[in-house]
Amino acid sequence: MLVNRFMHCKSSWIKALMVMVVLSLLQVTAIHIPKAHAAVASKTLVGYWHNFDNGSGFIKLRDVSPKFDIINVSFAEPTSGVTNGTIGFIPYNYTEADFKADVAYLQSQGKKVIISIGGANGQVQLPSTSARDNFVNSVIAIIEKYGFDGLDVDFEGHSLYFNSGDSDFKNPTTPVIVNLISALRTINNHFGTGPFYLTMAPETFFVQLGYSFYGGSCISCDNRAGAYLPVIYATRDILDWLQVQNYNSGPITGLDDQYHNMGNADFHVAMADMILTGFPVAKNPNQMFPPLRPDQVVLGLPANVNAGGGFTSVAEVHKALDALIKGVQLPSYKTRGSVSGYPNFRGLMTWSVNWDKFNNFEFSNSHRAYLDALSPPLPDTQPPTAPTHVTSMSKSATSVSLSWTASTDNVGVTGYIVYYGSQSVSVTGTSTVISGLTPDTSYTFTVKAVDARGNQSAASTPLTVTTDPPSTGGDTTPPTAPGNVQVTAKTATSVSLSWNASTDNVGVTGYIVTYGTSSVNTAGTSATINGLTANTSYSFTVTAKDAAGNVSAGTIISVTTAPQSGAQPWAANVSYKVNDEVAYGGKTYICRQPHTSLTGWEPPNVPALWLLK
């Protein structure tokens, strides 16, 4: 990925090129495979952020150009040698807390922050199942620790290769490839069907070169040639996009059986067309690598001349996009898969956001403007302003009364969330009373605003308040545990509970129903818990609290929510939340992120919002 960090000098690449010249007379015409059909209503701009300083200058995550949709943090790297599989990540020039805060800040702006593994210096090989398991466990831990939205695979150098005789990309046998495929599927499964992103950024050597040479089946060629092809093929159903590095590359033979060189529209169109059309691996018609969907294909480009070999001017990039998206054919290369273009082509990636800033944001400004002009913008991702002047109006031993100044938003603020410790309370106005607190205890409160599209603001400035000491003569006797906890009603998204009242020497003031990391406070002996997931088992613990802040032992009940009642027909101007199901065109779709639907955002058109069930 990085000529500035590590100049790639691959003798094996030169050898491969020499063989290509020798065999060029044997080239045959590529077999046409119909393009896949999927649609997107948006165009994506991806940028890599350096976890090191290579001369481009350090940049805080929160200072990345707002034109980027995806920020790839690069790189997480091996900690115990190339073949151990254990991956580590320590933020450069950041405290851990500040880095987490910046990740959360970008996410509050509607951006996705992905951890990228590998790079030119971070070679990763998984030759054994133990290395695979180390990789899986350490990567999951990194993603969960920092709150990343997904994983980008940027294996370079000698990370992937073929053993001799491994000639079928659909059924690989080389351990480093088989174990990587298994690891990626395991990680993806761990995070479920939610908005978890899996992307890849191979070099042309590992993808398009596989048309001419395949490392497991040819003699005297580099055994790494085309080594990403079995990985891409085996994960194509969970792969969000492939962003081949169209830089730091030697000449590559396209589907026209001509060499194409970096730095111009011709190269980018020819390289993308191979992925969009498909091709016979090693020119074997019995080994057809099938095309990816257009929304799975991203062009990888250097942000300026310092960022990598093969820098392409803005005008040439737009010429390439005109050919790929609009079908404005180049005189030098005609697309094979679709001469009318791919309107659902995903977008652009760059190495890097640091070099973009170094170059006065030419990449992000110029290409964002081009992409935005192609299609309607994404559903609103502009968050409200953060609430200000959070103030404690009053307090007692067990409660704190808060108020704040209203936030503003382009589509309207619908409410606020008050956070304290591991708990949160949703309110509609600009004040609330937080009850059920412990006497003589310090609490830190922050407030976020939420708009009509579900976007959350950045957190307010924290406010720390200490509750009053108990006013009951130092009472430490807790109430009795609530008895006879029962389920009085349940739906796919809610459970209603009731219980017998507890007793206490100074009087019970309320009850707390806890489930997972959430809780609900109530003054009576019943509560309805909303916002649950259909057909899911929950364990609820009910405790009583008294005026001194003492909390009783808990009474536990396990409840499984009702199954989903069935998908409702999709309609415009409806507010959908995560896991809502709708029917459209005879198929069922699951909502991936909260939004209010608009005409043109039908489920087949916006896979960023809807997942086909």
Image (spheres, helix red, strand yellow):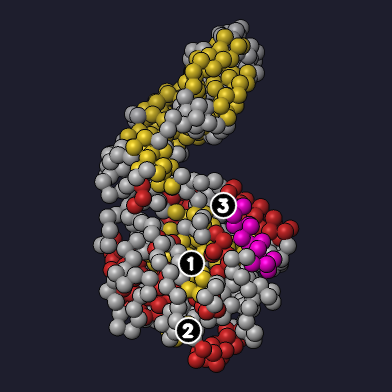
User: Of label 3 and label 1, which has the lower sequence position?
Assistant: 3
Q: Is residue 290 above or below residue 429?
A: below
Does the magenta-highlighted stretch encompass residue 510? no
Q: Position of residue 556 (x, y in %)?
A: 62, 21
Q: CA distance from mark 3 to mark 1?
A: 22 Å
Question: For residue 368, what is the image quadrant?
Answer: bottom left
Q: Is residue 152 above or below residue 468?
A: below
Give, as a single range, the part of the protein colored magenta: 172-187
Does the magenta-highlighted stretch encompass residue 182? yes
Q: Position of residue 201 (x, y in %)?
A: 51, 67
Q: Is residue 603 above or below residue 297?
A: above
From the image, tell me which residue sits under label 1: 290
- Decide: marks 1, 2 in contact (CB < 8 A)? no
Q: Position of residue 4 (x, y in %)?
A: 51, 77
Q: CA distance from mark 2 to mark 3?
A: 38 Å
The three-letter amino acid code for the residue at tag 2 is: Val
Query: What secondary structure is marked by label 3?
Result: helix
**Residue at 47% over, 24% down:** 491
**Residue at 40% over, 44% down:** 587
From the image, tell me which residue sits under label 2: 28
